[in-house]
């Protein structure tokens, strides 16, 4: 083999090989060396076997993975891929061969394997598809259908739209494009930041991949070949955000036992359902024996509480495109690497399936693209709003939407920030317009933009979503002296959620008090106790979280006449003023002291990492600026916690005409091994809002001989 691996000063891998297959092998081997623990954790999560070494905390996920048939769906998709596109299937298999070649060496250098008592296993050809599916199965937020059903049943159908906004477990992103007429260099700029759960190691890996057919920089998803979401080939660059499309359906299934089997009631009457039992092991708990049932609609992911009678019971089956169609869209991945123009990216994305994204792209010839990509089934409008009966034919899928929408780039600016946009026909819950409007406002201020200017947009902390609460506060009279002082202070506040701002903390405290008061109000109290669905689904049904994210609507609507909003805000202001006055020494005094990073780690703490959370828990992680509706979208859950578990999992600026001027950063580092030099060396610039250079000159790189 003629593989060459280089590193830049941040430890980012730059890999050259003789052809695409060899390069895929090299990418897989590098991923295993740099991210062995992460790869093996994700493989086990996709197979539903992670609790066997992570413990009972992972049991709920493993049960879900088994019931939803993640691994089996990946096998099905790979079989179809091998039949329809042998070249792409071989490319994926080469990546897997590389992973298997590098796992032992990668695991030997990572103390987490020893801590968990885990030995590296072996990847199968379909494992990258399983990892991809596991990473994105909750992207479309199908559990939100349970919330909408609960709201409709307990408050009435008219109340559902009051909460029609993305919630605390939704993956979002910012992205924007400036055409050449608005830039200093005359070429387009594409920038943004994906908002996902912040994980350590990070969900994105910066990488440079080159062979005679292409030379591409971008973000890889460890465990998956290519650069699916963000890349720059030198001739064209692309980036995505979550389209917030609804493409998964929950069907209410009537089920019964007949002999040794299970039957489900379909549109044509009772029909056989596939059923078998599986045992899910846990390292520190008794194994769980579960029944896996699949109807003609899809696998049953939960039972309907209290719906059993006369030997029958109800379950909820999940219909999701990869399971129904056997397609994850992997042929798009090598096609993106080979793209030279916007037309090439557009054609590649016609093969995209999962998840559904909004895409921006631009090329050196001046071409631009703003479109939706992915598989959305054609079905009844009711399927988007809640659960639907499996036995009624009206709710069956009727093919796929095609072609997917494209929209022009008007005025040289395009923005995607999970607002309705071009994906509006396909969704039920979108982000509020605050981020998108603020980005457009900042970009439209004029000037000739450069790549280095984009950090000011990435890190903008203006909180337009605070205005409804502050407007109510401004109209209050008769407040006590402390609450009146709080009111006057917040009305002078610049609406910036800066880390060093005491006013931002005061606003956050008031907001949380309002959320708690609304959650306790009799008008919303019927939503306080969700049905006993599996714990994995309950974050979508949490009343405090739902109110916190829909607060702007709930404070301005006239559809809940039983709530005296001024009185509620008055009481919250009095409570907050007293709380701030009574704050003990050492309690948070600024937003950043309360709003701290809380990354997800498979193991609690990092062995061998002296800077890990340790004995003082999450408080040792740094404080953050921003908030859920700021452009700097470091999301907390108002009324629940100030900690941030979801935020910018990467930042990037693609200079389309001059790739060497591009910039990027991730929250931690290029290497997944605790204590390694490049494990967390990007945390400091990420916190400051800085981006590091994208190196494209091979002469500026250092050849890697194993030291990462």
Image: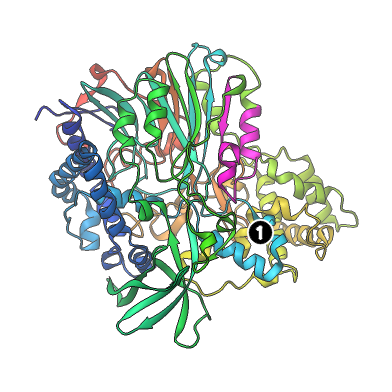
Image point 38% across, 55% down: which residue? 324
Q: Quadrant of the N terminus?
A: top left
Queried whether the magenta region covers residue 418, the answer comes back as: yes
Residue 58's quadrant in the figure? bottom left
Q: Disc 1 on helix, strand or loop?
A: helix
Furthest residue in direction bottom, as rendered: 310
Furthest residue in direction right, as rendered: 478
User: Can residue 427 be seen by looking at this rendering?
Assistant: yes
Residue 160's quadrant in the figure? bottom right
**Is residue 22 left or right of 81 when viewed as pictured?**
left
Queried whether the magenta region covers residue 229, the answer comes back as: no
Residue 421's quadrant in the figure? top right
Q: Quadrant of the C terminus?
A: top left
User: How far across and down, in percent of the image, does residue 348 sit?
Assistant: 37, 31
Q: Which residues are magenta?
A: 412-441
Q: Which residue is mark 1?
A: 547
Which color scheme did the rendering employ for the protein?
A: rainbow
User: How far across and down, in percent of the image, does residue 331 sit?
Assistant: 30, 37
- Classify 370 as above or below 357: above
Image point 14% across, 29% down: which residue? 3
């Amino acid at each position: 083999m003629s593989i060459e691996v280089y590193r830049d000063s941040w430890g980012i891998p730059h890999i050259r090989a003789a052809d695409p297959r060899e390069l895929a092998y090299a990418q897989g081997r590098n991923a295993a060396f740099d991210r062995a623990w992460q790869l093996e954790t994700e493989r086990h999560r996709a197979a539903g076997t992670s609790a066997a070494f992570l413990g009972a905390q992972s049991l709920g996920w493993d049960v879900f993975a088994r019931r939803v048939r993640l691994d089996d769906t990946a096998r099905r998709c790979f079989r179809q891929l091998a039949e329809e596109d042998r070249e792409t299937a071989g490319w994926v298999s080469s990546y897997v061969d590389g992973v298997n070649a590098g796992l032992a060496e990668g695991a030997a250098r990572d103390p987490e394997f020893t801590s968990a008592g885990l030995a590296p296993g072996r990847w199968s050809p379909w494992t990258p598809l399983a990892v991809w599916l596991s990473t994105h199965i909750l992207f479309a937020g199908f559990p939100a259908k349970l919330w909408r059903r609960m709201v409709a049943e307990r408050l009435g159908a008219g109340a559902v739209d009051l909460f029609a906004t993305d919630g605390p477990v939704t993956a979002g992103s910012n992205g924007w494009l400036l055409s050449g007429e608005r830039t200093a260099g005359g070429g387009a700029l594409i920038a943004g930041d994906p908002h996902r759960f912040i994980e350590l190691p990070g969900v994105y890996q910066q990488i440079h991949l080159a062979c005679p057919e292409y030379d591409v920089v971008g973000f890889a998803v460890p465990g998956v070949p290519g650069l699916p979401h963000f890349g720059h080939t030198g001739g064209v660059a692309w980036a995505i955000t979550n389209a917030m499309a609804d493409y998964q359906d929950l069907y209410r299934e009537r089920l019964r036992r007949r002999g040794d089997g299970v039957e489900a009631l379909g549109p044509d009457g009772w029909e056989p359902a596939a059923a078998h039992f599986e045992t899910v092991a846990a390292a520190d708990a008794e194994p769980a024996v579960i029944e896996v049932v699949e109807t003609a609609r899809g696998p049953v992911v939960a039972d309907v509480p209290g719906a059993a009678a006369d030997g029958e019971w109800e379950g909820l089956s999940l219909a999701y495109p990869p399971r129904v169609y056997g397609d994850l869209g992997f042929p798009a991945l090598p096609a993106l690497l080979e793209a030279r123009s916007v037309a090439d990216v557009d054609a590649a994305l016609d093969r995209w399936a999962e998840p559904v994204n909004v895409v921006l792209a631009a090329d050196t010839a001046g071409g631009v693209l703003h479109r939706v990509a992915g598989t959305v089934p054609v079905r009844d409008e009711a399927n988007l709003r809640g659960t639907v009966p499996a036995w009624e034919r009206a709710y069956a899928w009727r093919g796929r939407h095609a072609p997917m929408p494209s929209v022009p780039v008007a005025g040289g600016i395009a923005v995607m920030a999970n607002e309705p946009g071009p994906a509006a026909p396909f969704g039920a819950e979108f982000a509020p317009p605050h981020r998108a409007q603020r980005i457009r406002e900042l970009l439209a201020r004029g000037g000739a933009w450069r790549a280095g200017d984009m950090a000011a947009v990435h890190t903008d902390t203006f909180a337009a979503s605070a205005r409804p609460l502050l407007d109510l506060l401004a109209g209050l009279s008769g407040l006590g002296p402390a609450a009146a002082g709080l009111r006057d202070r917040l009305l002078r506040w610049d609406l910036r959620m800066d880390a060093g701002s005491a006013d931002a903390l005061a606003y956050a405290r008031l907001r949380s008090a309002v959320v708690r008061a609304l959650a306790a109000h009799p008008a919303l109290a019927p939503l306080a106790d969700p049905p006993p669905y599996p714990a994995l689904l309950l974050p979508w049904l949490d009343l405090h979280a739902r109110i916190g994210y829909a607060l702007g609507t709930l404070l301005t609507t006239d559809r809940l006449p039983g709530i005296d909003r001024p009185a509620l805000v008055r009481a919250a202001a009095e409570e907050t003023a007293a709380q701030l006055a009574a704050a003990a020494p050492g309690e948070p005094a600024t937003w950043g002291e309360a709003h701290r990073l809380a990354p997800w780690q498979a193991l609690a703490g990092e062995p061998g990492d002296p800077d890990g959370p340790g004995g003082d828990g999450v408080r040792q992680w740094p404080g953050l600026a921003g908030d859920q509706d700021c452009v700097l979208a470091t999301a907390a859950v108002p009324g629940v916690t100030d900690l941030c578990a979801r935020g910018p999992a990467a930042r990037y600026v693609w200079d389309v005409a001059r790739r060497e001027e591009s910039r990027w950063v991730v929250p931690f580092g290029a290497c997944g091994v605790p204590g390694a030099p490049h494990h967390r060396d990007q945390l400091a610039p990420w916190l400051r809002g800085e981006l590091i250079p994208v190196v494209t000159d091979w002469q500026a790189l250092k050849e890697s001989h194993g030291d990462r």
